[in-house]
Every structure is written in C-alpha cells, then in structure tokens.
Image (spheres, rainbow, N blue to C red):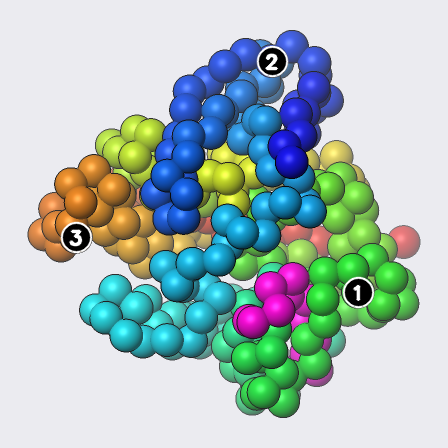
Amino acid sequence: MKETLLSCPVCSHKHLRAFGEATDFTVSNEKFSLTECVNCGFVFTNPRPNSESIGPYYESEEYVSHTSTKKGLIFSLYHAVRSFTLGRKARFVSRFMSGTNLLDVGCGTGDFLSEMQKRGWNVKGIEPAETARLLAKRKGLDVYPQDFLFHGFNNQSFDAITLWHVLEHVHDLEHTIRTLYKLLKPDGILLIAVPNRDSLDAKHYGFHWAAWDVPRHLYHFRAKDVIKLMVDQGFKWEKTAVMPFDSFYVSLLSEKYIHGRYRYFQAFFVGLRSLISAWTGKDLGSSQQYVFRKPRA
C-alpha cells in the first residue's frame, strides 16, 4: 500500500508541488513522483510505499549493502572500497568521542561494527533486513531488528550513534530523531551520512542520478535540510565532510541507468569533477557526513 504525505517532513509546511519523476532502476522499474515543499525546498518521494509494503523493493542482489557477495566487478569494487573506508569512518567518529559505547542504526551486515569492535568499542546495531541481520550475527555482533530501537535500550545509553546512508530510508522521521536524541548521553554525537542532491553529479545525471534510488530513498536531502532537521530536534551541528568515494560509485550506476552498461571512463570523469567541485567549495559532495552533538544538560 502507498501513503501520501500532506506536509513537508522538514518544516511541516502544507504548500507542496510536483518536482519530477524518478524510476526504480534496481527492482521494479516503476516510476515514483517527487514532491517539493514550496516553503523550504525540501524534496521527498510522495506518494510512497508504507513501512509494511516497502520490503519487496529491497529484495534484490543488486542492493549491495545487504549482501556479502563479491561476485562480479561492481560487487568486488564496492566491497574493496568499503574495506578501505571502514578505517576512515572509524577514525572520523573517534575524533569527536570520549566514550566507547556505539550504536549503528541500519548496520547492514555489520562491517563497520566489527571494525569499531576491533578498536575496543562496545558496539550494538539495528538492522531491519533479516538476511543482513543474520549475517551480522554470524560475526558475533549484537544486532537487533528495527523495533528494538524504540523499545529495547535505556535512555542515555550511547556515546555515539551512527547512521550511514540510513536516514533517507526512515518512514517515521520525527519519531526516529527524537528517539536517537534520548538514547544519546549528554555530549554524545550523532553522525549521519546521506546523499546530496545539490552535488555536481546529481545535477549532471538529472533523474537518472542513482542516488534518487526510489522508492527506497524516501527523502532527498541538501545540507541545509539535514542541519535544520537536526537542530530543530535539539542537536548542535558541529561538522560536515564529504564522502569522497561515493561520487564515483553513484556516477557508475547512473551511467548504467542511462546507457544500459557500465561506462567506467565516463563515470570516473564525472565522479572526479564532482569531487573536485566539492573540495573547492563550488558544490557539496555526492554524499555528505554530518556530525551533531547532544548538548550537556
């Protein structure tokens, strides 16, 4: 079943208009409408499958974050890059932390949790997809289903909560953010990574941009959308940083969506231009990571 939002998820304004249409290139080939808030410019998938019916749109071997397979060049490249970036993510999170209790929401098969555990952190994860959750548990990790986020932990349990490309998938956005705030200790950090529809690669590929990823991506953020959303819920924004490899991966998928095949040179060129544009301050990156802190009481 589909549900239709009648107000903006960021500013609650009710004056909305059509923004365009994007295709689900991964699973169904269905087209989904995008809606824009007239007040703040936020764009979201609308109407969208509700939380009970969206599951089949994740059931694809092409959805790499939920699989450990390395069959094929794209899967091999993805996992090779992910292995390299795990250390970068761990060091980035550790820069802002004093404690060691970590919750990773949408942890997939648990690779980031494993990396943090090796570094001495006490880690737990939330993963709604059963297959990915079972793979994580086989690694000896404490990983729980989605509902556990709202009912399974005590308030102020964690020094850090991370959401790596998760917020764009969350149906009940406001309730989830309020819950994350409660679960963090005072002075704890919330780290969020999401695609950025203001990036050069997004502008280049238009509605073939792979990070629209409808209907799995319910929201299509810009930097100011993320910051407003979190600050309105009481968080303090500390830092924004580019995720350098995402522009290449997203560009490669986008080339396939347009041309029916992976065009490696073209994707590398567009990804490099996007990354340089982000580094020089002309645009933001294809994906951004944001650090927020819960103020001391």
Residue depicted at x 63% and y 45%: 53
> Is the residue under label 3 in contact with that under label 1 (CB below 8 Å)?
no
Residue depicted at x 52% and y 45%: 216
Give the SS element for disc 2.
Answer: strand
Give the SS element for disc 1.
Answer: helix
Q: Position of residue 117 (x, y in %)?
A: 60, 85
Please tell me the numbered disc located at residue 262.
3
Q: Nearer the viewer, residue 167 or 290?
A: 167
Q: Which residue is mark 2?
A: 16
Q: Which stretch is magenta? A: 121-132
126 magenta-colored: yes
Q: Nearer the viewer, residue 76 or 113?
A: 76
Q: Which residue is mark 1?
A: 148
Whether residue 50 is visible to the viewer of this picture, yes or no, is: yes
Q: Nearer the viewer, residue 73 or 248?
A: 73
Give the SS element for disc 3.
Answer: loop
Where residue 255 sits, quadrant-wise, is top left
The amino acid type, in three-letter code, at marker 3 is Tyr
Please tell me which of labels 1 and 2 falls first in the chain: 2
The amino acid type, in three-letter code, at marker 2 is Leu
Task: From the viewer's perspective, tell me whether residue 174 is left or right of residue 50.
Answer: right
Task: From the viewer's perspective, tell me whether residue 9 is left or right of residue 245.
Answer: right
Q: Position of residue 61 (x, y in %)?
A: 39, 63
For label 3, the crowd category at 10 Å Cα-Cα, with few meaning under 14, some 14 to 19 and many 20 or more, is: some
Q: Position of residue 153 (x, y in %)?
A: 85, 68
Vertically, is 78 above or below 258?
Answer: below
Please tell me which of labels 3 and 2 falls first in the chain: 2
Please tell me which of labels 1 and 3 falls first in the chain: 1
Q: CA distance from mark 1 to mark 2?
A: 34 Å
